[in-house]
Image (cartoon, rainbow, N blue to C red):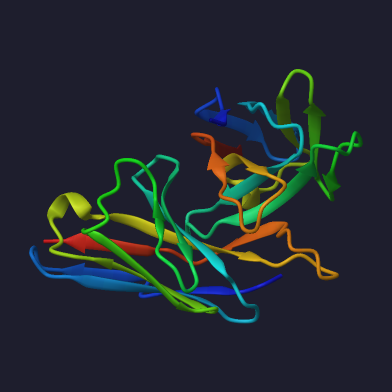
Amino acid sequence: GAVVSQHPSRVICKSGTSVKIECRSLDFQATTMFWYRQFPKQSLMLMATSNEGSKATYEQGVEKDKFLINHASLTLSTLTVTSAHPEDSSFYICSASKPGQGGVWRSTEAFFGQGTRLTVV
Amino acid sequence: AQTVTQSQPEMSVQEAETVTLSCTYDTSESDYYLFWYKQPPSRQMILVIRQEAYKQQNATENRFSVNFQKAAKSFSLKISDSQLGDAAMYFCAYRRRTGWGEKLTFGTGTRLTIIP
């Protein structure tokens, strides 16, 4: 399988500050990455689709100015939570789609990072 | 819009027994993937099994198998010979087949407990 690394795994920040979370595909190039948010005992909620070299596509209800996404290279996407507040405390997970084999442009499987637990105090 | 429904918030099974987790979905597409993901306490998402909608044969991966009923839009997961390490949250997920890096739509999850 492929490896997606997410960093940091845990972060505590003060209210009003910004925090950056990195998502890296270590052994494949990912033109598309996804950012999810997961509340305790709940499912994964897609926040945005990160596209290399272009603007991210945000899901309805997700604040673009609060959750800044940058996909500057084929192996790195970052999520910056700006002016964080306690209600932003959550578990954030990224995933990357690995290209299909044989030159097929369809990807067949998403690989997930380990997740980041953000606590805003 | 596609939706995925898991009607069993919690399930439990005796070790070595068999358990089936239910999933239904709604889509107007004819070509798509369905997945079962496992999320153990570490919260790392792990792919358990994948089914391509155009394939009639049910997918199998060792002790894990699915019952894919396309017409009924049902996709259940059967775990045979349950082991303590199978304890986790299980998420059913849908994805359109076409498209580069299409997003996943997840169900609400089923928490599986294994009773020793």
Relative image position of residue B112 (x, y in whole percent): 57, 38
Residue B89 visible in the current orientation:
no
Depth check: A99 or A37 in front?
A99
Image quadrant in which you'd find residue A31: bottom right
In the depicted view, which residue is nearer to us: A14 or B61?
A: A14
Left or right of B65? Residue B105 is left
Q: Residue furthest top?
A: B72
Q: Which residue extends farthest front?
A: A54
Q: Quadrant of residue B19?
A: top right
**Direction from residue A23 to residue B26 in the image, left or right:** right
**Residue at position x 69%, y 47% in the image:** B83
Give A81 or B77, whichever is nearer the viewer. Answer: A81
Whether residue A82 sits left or right of residue A15 in the image: it is: right
Location of residue A109 in the rendering, given as x and y in whole percent from the top left corner: 68, 58
Position of residue B42 relative to residue B9, above or below, is: below
* Camera-nearest residue between B105 and B28: B28
Q: Quadrant of the C terminus of chain B?
A: top right
In which quadrant of the rendered view does residue B16 lie? top right
Give how far across and how far down residue A3 sits, in percent. 61, 74
Q: Is residue A88 visible?
A: yes
Q: Residue at x 23, y 71 (%)?
A: A19
Task: Identify the residue shown where x is 21% and y is 58%.
Answer: A66
Identify the residue shown where x is 28% and y is 68%.
A80
